[in-house]
Image (cartoon, grey):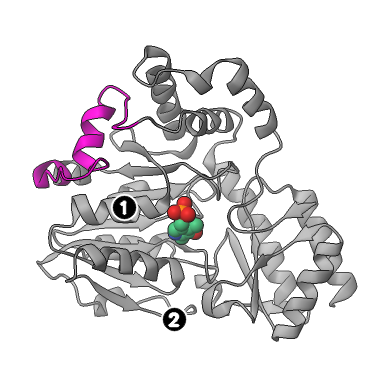
Amino acid sequence: MYTFNPGPSAVYPEVRNYLTAAYDEGWLSAPHRGERFTGLMRQTIEELKKKLNIPQDYTVFFLSSATECWEVLAQSLTPTKSFHLYSGAFGEKWYEYAKALRPACTGYPFGIDEVPDVAALPLPDDEVDMVCITQNETSNATQLRDGFILNLYNRLGGALLAVDATSSLGGVQLKYIKADVWFASVQKCFGLPAGLGLMVLSPRAVARFRQINERSHYNSLTAQYEKMLNYQTTHTPNVLGIYLLYRVLQDRQPIKTVHQHLLDRATKLYDYFDQATQLKPLVQNPETRSTTVIGLQGPPQLIDDVKRRALQLGLQLGNGYGNWKPTSLRIANFPAIPDAAFEQLVQFFAKEYA
Ligand SMILES: *Cc1c(COP(=O)(O)O)cnc(C)c1O
């Protein structure tokens, strides 16, 4: 059985051994103020920076989910309002969470085949604290490329740029220096069980939240920062999740290699579905197609039929999301899914739906 669900997604088979090791090595009862745990935190952050090419002067925090990251950013880095560019359900949800805390927030929706024209955006606006984008929109299988992010970064004025990279961080080589905040959760491109989020912050973002100094919540960034100076957290952390992340990172190739592998697989799949089959890529514009989530579209009956028959062969495809649910399906192209799974998948389509 292979799952192509884009989250929670396939975990690495090695996770089974890591779990046993976590138990045997006593991590499950390790005191989180003790040296053993703080050593693990330090090594995990070192390994993360090394394997993913995160600049040394960036700060890493562990949270519980990407959703928590959305809320913390509104609390601790958005005294007035944020500006949200979105094309799909996750970007829109982020906007809604932010608006619930800061009603002055504004949103700018765009289409799935569209690269927004940065010069035409209502920016800079001196009142905007943060510009928010979703690098990989998991719901509709779109992606914002480096060039767009760079253009946006150059037009920020005093605002920070925050990037939801939940379904690409760990799979795609991101240009961390071209934004101030990046975040993800581990059940997507890290091939791990859910329950751990991570946030990566530029020196500029750290200086900003320290200056704002918001302290009303257990997860306020200032409080997290003060604890993290000693590799600790404000609360009892997900020690198991952090341990699993450490193990998975140790066994990983550098991000450059991982990225190239995913890119090759995505290119093959898009080429295939552009030509031969009854289903078509959901996203028409090659410039806005995601590397890590491939969306396919077709009539509802065909979509149902494909999912059902694939499942009979042990291939679990991801459902469409939100508005796209009846007329699309999604295929995660995450690092933990083996090449053999994709070979079976293409054979299935070639045989049944050519
Ligand atoms: C999955 C996902 C989220 C939500 O992640 P949680 O860990 O469930 O909070 C947010 N944004 C994007 C782009 C996602 O793919």
| Image coords of residue 1 (percent x, y) | 80, 51
Name the quadrant of the C terminus.
bottom right
Q: Is residue 168 above or below residue 197?
A: below
- Magenta-colored stretch includes residue 160: no
Nearest the viewer among 311 and 349 is 311
Tell me if 137 is positioned left or right of 71 in this view: right
Query: What is the number of the mark on residue 190?
Result: none
Q: Is residue 166 visible?
A: no
Residue that carries the numbered disc 2 in the rendered image? 111
Nearest the viewer among 24 and 122 is 24
Amino acid type, label 2: Gly
| Image coords of residue 218 (percent x, y) | 25, 40
Q: Which residues are magenta?
A: 209-235
State how far apart marks 1 and 2 are (Cα): 23 Å
Tell me if 104 is positioned left or right of 187 in this view: left
Q: Secondary structure at mark 1?
A: helix
Amino acid type, label 1: Lys
| Image coords of residue 91 (percent x, y) | 39, 67
Tell me if 345 is positioned left or right of 7 in this view: right
| Image coords of residue 79 (percent x, y) | 13, 57
Q: Is residue 145 above or below residue 110?
A: above
Residue that carries the numbered disc 1 in the rendered image? 178
Tell me if 235 is positioned left or right of 255 in this view: left
